[in-house]
Every structure is written in structure tokens, then in C-alpha cells.
Amino acid sequence: MPEKQFNPLEFEEKWHARWDADDALYRAPQHPQRKYYVLEMLPYPSGRLHMGHARNYSIGDALARYKRMQGFDVLHPMGWDAFGLPAENAAIQQKRQPREWTLANIAQMKKGLKRLGFSLDWEREIATCEPEYYRWNQWFFLKMYERGLAYRKESLVNWCPKCATVLANEQVVDGCCWRHEDTAVEQRSLEQWFLRTTAYSEELLAGLKDLEKGWPERVLTMQRNWIGRSEGAEVDFSLENSAEKIRVFTTRVDTIYGATCLILAPEHPLAARLVSAEDQAKLKAMVDDQGRKDPSNLEKEGFPTGAYARNPYSGERTPIWIGNFVLMGYGTGAIMAVPGHDERDFEFCTKYGIPIRAVVKPADSELREPLEKPFTEYGISVNSGAFSGLPTAEARQRMAAYAQEQGFGNPSITYRLKDWGVSRQRYWGTPIPMVHCSQCGVVPVPEQDLPVVLPLDVEITGAGESPLARHEAFWKTTCPQCGQAARRETDTMDTFVDSSWYFYRYCDAHNSTAPFDKAIAGSWFPIDQYIGGVEHAILHLIYSRFWTKVMRDLGLITNAEPATKLFTQGMVLKDGAKMSKSLGNIVDPEAMVAKFGADTCRLYVLFAAPPDKDMDWQDAGVEGQFRFLGRVYRFVTRSVDRLNGAPAELTSEDKRALKKLHQTIGKITQDFEERWHFNTSIAALMELTNELYACEAGLTSGALREILRNLILLLEPFTPFLAEELWEEIGEQGPVFRQRWPEVNPEYLVEDTLEIPVQVNGKLRGKIRVATGTAEADILDAARRDEKIAVLLEGKELIKAIAIPGRMVNFVIKG
RNA sequence: GCCCGGGUGGCGAAAUCGGCAGACGCAACGGACUUAAAAUCCGUUUCUCCGCAAGGGGAGUGCGGGUUCAAGUCCCGCCCCGGGCACCA
């Protein structure tokens, strides 16, 4: 009989069709265990774990199905990216209604996910584009507004000219928009809505400690840097001939006796008043420059205001300057310049001839003045009045305390983290539920009037103006307080708001009285395992942590963190660059799928590297995976005839194959549970297959069924189509993904004898075979008697003999 | 500048707790089958030296030191690559 041909395209189509026709197949059994996974299904191929959604191409499904077998449940996979700004951009390009486009996108995604075998109860889903979701976003916004966590203020903000909208700090990458890496972000002064993420600075930082076990070090570090806690003191310098004070923040208050000038940020509120009339233009130019130029290579510039302030410690009269390198957005917007002990101040003061003074010396030597470079390390205070002689750490503490006692300052902690600007001048997003009344000012929309819904007849021009601001029927309203004509807020919320808490809503998506029920959310959260790209380390992953803490303080949940474990998958690169739509270097997996089938392609992506590593896409090598699957297919199909023979004693080949099989079960189970290194799982399956080929002639019906069944079960997470096909071939019932995961039978793993490497002076010189469990002395004895070893030991002085039972023998000799 | 990763054959990579470096695959080469090719099956393949051969020696995980019977793995000091932060006071 001719051998069956391996034709994956044919049977993949068959299984697609069968699965499409049988909805019931996807209703997962309820499981009492309260664990689940949120798997993000990003609709672009840069994610290593997810390769597009339209076809069965992701290993998200593999994990999901595997975990279901392990008793885990999958709550929901979600591609929020499909609901946010790309939807609007694509709609503009296609001249279509964004809502229509997005719903079509969701439908397509659902279809794809169903093929992946996700256990989804579609009825429970509410997409973020639906009015019900606006309601709860708006509800949260009002709650935050009540508590002062949402506020509106005019400020300099990042503006992407391409998106024609404001961006949060987190969304600016290298001075460019995170969506348009070729477009420089501009600074504009606008009235914007903010969420007070800074209210949680300390907690967001402290919480990272609890995540150390489950989150990658890299992400924790990025978040720590982003929050940027820095301990120091704030000190008031009093303005000469005025009751006003200039407050500075410093981490080195111990150097204050060396402060030879104060420098204000150009935007400092006092700056314009202190600067003389003829210098006003200079000041204005500096403000503009600071917003525009790349700060990393901006030349330090400044000029004196002519005004003076008094140093509260030394009483010294200190000139006040304006400097372009001082930022209004950090600390107090004013610094004391200590050129003797700070690189930047040194550069600035040297340039303008401002005196340089040493007030800290190294513990074991003296400083020679004039200083050639600043001494920035810790040492001993000198020339510092009553504080002279103190080591730096103590001086910092004592001097900050002194400021507090005397009432001109206090110890202080400053954070780099800023509040989250959530206003967007887009159509697509949740409308901010506020009304502007000329009489009452800003008035929140009453809770019972929610949701404020987006109009559907909006015109999207892409011309860079808020479409809602041009939609009179939307913005024309009355004030909820006085009933007069008023203007509705036309800004919409950043779509990162949606992604900050959607996964909580999925627990209880039909709740009409609250975002979700506390008990239900409590039974699910926190997430056990979260998977996503590292690109969200300081975007989504900070926002959703913030939102979780707010929800906890609102009494909605009890967990302080959204996810206990985080896995950051690597990106797929093309020629060393991140694949992206804007760069146009996307590899379309469809062509490869069309040639080799989805199983082969998925296997290829998984085999190339562990999933947390970036991987440069190369087409070469796919054939190897195709060949491997062909080998499996042919082995199983040609073994079917022998499956039902009369049972007999197990042959040595049977035993050998069963041993390898059970080793493989152990290996793959471990990879899934501990490491997620699927590349080594697949290598183990290849080894098993190679072993089966080597043993094939001697395999009997006594072992074959167990071998084939388990081989298929092990393959199923990686190649679901092939698994189903072969499962049917060997006459088994039911979908493979409903089967129990195989377990190791330790009986097959027992070894009668062991091979032990023998070293002489640490170099491998031979191997001996001994019975399992042989005692140390007997192993050494056997090693000494080994021909090769005996020759080497002959006539030499034996210094030491080490035997690690079951592992290794090492003789140390001399002469 | 500061903070994280990483550096292993021609290539992608293994080596999980300090115990046989290079599993598995790609590419390459050789053999079987074939009129031939494809496909398939079976081999070889870190580098280097000695040998006709069987076989044997030496070196080797970015570089230099150290700890250890034993180091890709631990410690110290460098180099290079990738990523993050950055006039942050």
C-alpha cells in the first residue's frame, strides 16, 4: 500500500470547516479553579506570541488550550488596539465610519479567535466602542473629579501634528509621537484634562516590590526610572527688598554654602517680573526654544536678572539668573547653582564667570582651589558654618531638618512622574462628561445622564481638528446646574483609559448598576499571568496599575495590583528593525501559511527562539519544520495497521521508545509550567520522533497505541490541525484539546545502568557504565579499573579522587 | 553619564541547581533509492594538529585575572552589542 501523502493544506481546511460548523465545540467546561489568562491578541505581527488573528496562527491558543487542560480557564483575549486610534486612522484612509470599521474588525477577530479554540462566551462581551463602556469610563471620570483626581488646567502639552492631538508624556518616544516615529512632537499651551497619577507616585513605586517575583526585572526598572523618586530638601531663598520667596529643590542641601547663584526656569512665574524690560524678548525666545529643541545637546545659556536673593543658611546675597536648562516641570522650577559640586552648574558658572567654591572635600584628602572639575561625590562638609566637618549623608539630613526647624524649608521627595494628560482632540474615544457654562464654569454631567454618546453622523476629515468641536448638535447643550445654554466638552479620553480596566469589566459585562460586581471581580483578580509586549512597560502597565489603585480606593476591588505575573514577549524584527505598519517592513505570514500550512508556520516561529526574546525574521528554515511534521505524519499513518495486533511481550525497542516518550512528556510539561521555552519542547518532540524512527522495526502493538496517543497529545499545543487529523487516523474519539494532558509514568524512566564520565585533572578521559545506585567507593573502583584511566593513573601520585554518584568521577594526580 | 539585558560553531540556538559545551534544526557535504531529478531514508559536520587507517593529541563559550577537584554558569576588572532613562537639580 502506498504511503499516505502529507498534505497539511488539505486537512487544515477540513478542520477549519468542521470547527466553524460546530459552535458547541468551543463551549469550555466550567472549572471551579479561579485562574485565568488574559491574552492580548495584537492585530499586528510584531508580537512574538501572536502572529495575526485572522488565521489560526497564534500560540496564544496553544497556551490557552494547554492551560485549560491543566484546569485553568481563559477569561478573555483582547486586542484593544483595534478599538483605538488605528481604527480611526484606518477609517479615515478608507473613508468609512470608524464605528462600522471597528465592529467589522471585531467580528473578524472573533472569527479568528474561535478558530483558535478560545473558550469565549460571546454574549458577555461588550466592546470598548459601545455606549455601555462609555458610561463606565465616564462614571470613573466623575468619581475621580469628585475626589480631585481629575482636573483641568492650562499647560504646555505634547502635540503630534500628524495625529492632530495631544499626547501624554508616556506616549512621546524620542521626541516623536509613539505612532508616528518620524514626526517630532511640538509643545502647545492648551487647556487639558489630567488624571492625578502623581497622587499614587509613592505607591506605584512601592508596589513594584511586590511584583519582583512575577514581573521581568527590565519592566520594573523602567517603571522605577519613569517614576523617578528623588530624596532631598526644599529651601526658600528670600527675595531681596520683597517678602516673596524663591523655593528651590535640591538633593544636596549639604552643598548650599557653595551656592553662588539661583537659576530660574524661563517659565518660572517670577521670571517675567524680575527680568528687565530690555531682556523680555530674550526670555520669550528662551521659553520657545525650550519647547522646541532637543534638550540633550542644547547649549547651556542664561543671563542675570539683576535681582538678588538671600541664602537662608549663610545669609549670603546671591544673584538670580535665568537658565535655559532649568525645567519648570521638575521640582520647583528653580535651582541653586553649586558649581563646585555639580557638573551642570560647573559648566554654567564657568561659562559666565560666576564664582566657584568648594564646600565638600574628600574624606581622605584636601581639595585644591580653584577646582578643575566639580567634586560630586560624598565627602566631608567644609566652609559650611555650623555644619562643617559633617559627612555628606549626615549633613544632608541635619541641614534639611534645620530648614524645617527654622521654617524656611523641609525635607522633600520629588518624582519625575507627571499627571496623565487624558484629553484628546479626536472623534474616537469616550467623551469627557463635562459641560462648560458661562455662569457656573465647569460642571460635571450628572450620573443619571450618562453615557454621553458620540454622534454617528460625524464627518472625519483627517484635517487635524477635533470633529466633535465642529459638530454643533453634539456640543450644544444646557448647563445641568442653571439650565442656561452651555457648551459640552468636546475632548475625548485617551484610549489608554479603556485599556486600563476593560479586563475587569469582562468579569461582569452586563452589570448595569456598577462597572462590575465587587465579589465577582474579587473572585478573578488579580490576573495570574499577563502576557504583552515590553513596549507597554511604561504606558499601559503604569496606567492600569494606577487605575487598579483608584478602583481599590473607590471600594470596587481589594487587590492593589492588576497582575501578579507578567510575561513580556519579544518582538519579531525584520532586518534588525521593529516590524511596523509605518515602516512597511511587515512580513505577511499568509504567503507562508499558504505554502506550508499554519501548523508549520507556528512551529517555525516557536522553534526559532524562546518567546521572550526578539527574533529577526528569516524565511530560511521553515522547510525543517515542514519536514519534521511530515515525518510525524508518515510515522503515525503507516503505524495504524500495526495498532491492533495481538498483545505480546514488550520488545527492547518498545521499552526504548516508551522511555523516550515519557522523558519527553516530563520535559514538555516542565517547559510549559516553568519556563515557556517552547523551542526546547519542540526539540524534544523532534528527538522523540527520531528515536521512534530508529526503533520502528521492533515496535509492537503492546506499546504503539500509548506512544501514538501521547505523541499526538504532546504535539497538539503546537500543531492543532495535525493533531486532530492524526487523532482521527488512529481511530480516537473527540477533539484532542479536550483530552487529558499526558502524565509521566516513572516506571518507564528507571535505568538499570548509568554511564558516568571519568575525568583526570578535570579533563574527560573515559566513561564507565555502572549499575544504578552503585556506592561511591565502588564507582571509584570501577573507574580505576577502566583501561584508559588505568593507563593514565599508572605511576602517578593520586592526590584526590572525587565521585559524585550518578554524575561524575574526577581523579587529581601529580607527576 | 546612570540603570537593565546580552555576547556560545557558517547560521537560529541548547546546556534548567557549578558536573560530558554545541542538544534540536538550518545550511553544507557524502551515501542509499531513482534512467534522471524532486521527495524520502541513512550518515558526516566547533576549530586545529598527528596518522594510510582504526585512533589519538591540543585549543575552545567577547577579553584579562580569581575561586573550585571541576566554570558558558560564581567573584573582580575591562571590551563590544541591544534596550531604557537623561540638562531631573
Image (tube, coloured by chain):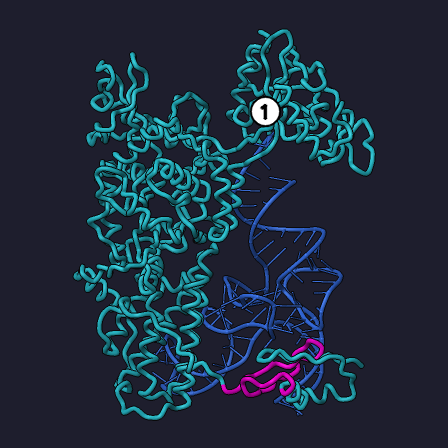
Chain colours: A cyan, B blue
| Residue under the point 75% across and 24% down | A386
Q: Is residue A104 visible?
A: yes
**Main secondary structure type of the part rendered in magenta:** strand
**Amino acid type assigned to the residue bearing label 1 in the image:** Val
Query: A301 and A658: which one is in front?
Result: A658
Query: A91 and A351: which one is in front?
Result: A351
| Residue under the point 33% across and 83% down | A704
Residue that label 1 marks: A326
Tell me the quarter of the picture where residue A398 sits: top right
Number of numbered markers = 1
> Residue B8's spot in the image, x, y percent?
59, 64
On screen, residue A359 versus residue A248, left or right, reads: right
Which element type, helix, strand or loop, lies under badge 1?
loop
> Residue A788's spot in the image, x, y percent?
67, 88
Instruction: Check the image and report above or below for A118 versus A328.
Output: below
Please state the extent of the stretch shown in magenta in the rendering.
A752-778
A774 magenta-colored:
yes
A537 magenta-colored:
no
